[in-house]
Image (tube, rainbow, N blue to C red):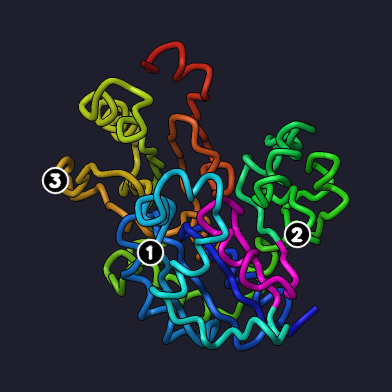
Amino acid sequence: MKEKGVFVITSVYHILIAILLIEQKNLRDSILVIVKLTPNIDTLVEPLKKSPWFTDVKLMMGRSEQKRLLGKFAYKFNRKNVVTLIDKTIDLSGIDNTITDFDFYMASPDSAKQYFLYKYKKSTFFMLEDGTKTYLDLEPNVLKKIGHSILNKPLNNGYDKRFTKVYATNPSGLPPILKEKGALLNWRETFKQLPQEKKELLLDIFLGGNKSVTQTLLNTNKTKSIVVTQPLSEDKKMESEVEKIKIYTDFIESCKTDVVYLKPHPREKTDYHTVFKGQDHVVILEQLFPVELLNGIPGLQFESGFTVFSSSLDHLNVKHKVNLGLDYFREHYAK
């Protein structure tokens, strides 16, 4: 196992996981490659470059742009052409594909990230879990495996043989084939053990330097609640944005605390600052803020927490949790 890592991610959650795995494994001189998917994630590039965890941070085109430039046919049936395409648009000269001095850590391996499997054939690849999806996605059937082999397409979600480890918070709960590759991703304990200055640096990076929000989070004299949102209308899971906003408005009205934090999902388009304008007790957290970071704030406890069916609420220190659940949502709201 190498001392250097290249982390290939798409979400802010996985940026946090990458940083904590660097701390857990004492890696050095790591490089972060952000594959474009999450809106405005490019605003984190410069702060992360200045952090102690990465020597460089790169932005790489995402799936939709790769597919558009290659063409749907080539993207599906001759995807290795993506190497030539991406080599023209991103400078990865710091990672020599003839020298295996880096291990690759890939979050949610999918077609948009397969460039690295094609280009860096001599390197070792590890996977970082992608929440519940990693535990629910079953092994591809024989026909799919044969099809991928004929087309030289890597299998998704860590099932490809090139992935030798799958870092997971619960390795024993992985599907059978992945369980054989399972390794402990002990990010919560690692986060707890971080020096306070590193915790504050993480808060500063992901809150965009918003000191006023940081101060409200650190203020132990006020009672707090939290509402965790999801891109329900954006993902066409319900009829309209108005209906979605009504759910979160009802949640906020149910909170009986001094402060209510609303954590928007990174892919939402709703402007919650406008929706709750004039309600001074409602604090809108940054969309690119990983909600898991709240666990590292000393003394922070929420009296109540609300969500439709996001698992993020499970990770927070909340006395009274209200999670409507996926079944309830499907019955009452889904299109």
Can you tell which mark lies on residue 37?
A: none
Relative image position of residue 43 (x, y in whole percent): 31, 70
The residue positioned 50% from the left and 55% from the top of the image is: 112
Dot 1: what SS?
loop
Looking at the image, is mark 1 or mark 3 earlier in the sequence?
1
- Tell me what residue is drawn at x 69 percent, y 85 percent: 98
The amino acid beneath tag 2 is Phe
Mark 3, residue position? 274
Mark toward the viewer: 1 or 3: 3
Picture disc at residue 163 = 2
Label 1 to label 3: alpha-carbon separation: 25 Å
Name the one closer to the observer, 129 or 152: 152
Q: Which mark is first along the chain, 3 or 2?
A: 2
Residue 229 percent coordinates (x, y): 38, 39
Disc 3, SS: helix
Residue 317 part of the magenta-drawn span: no
Q: Quadrant of the N terminus?
A: bottom right
Residue 29 x, y percent position in the rendering: 60, 88
For the residue marked with disc 3, what is the amino acid?
Thr
Q: Residues within 10 Å of mark 3 (few under 14, many from 20)?
A: few
On screen, residue 233 above or below 97: above
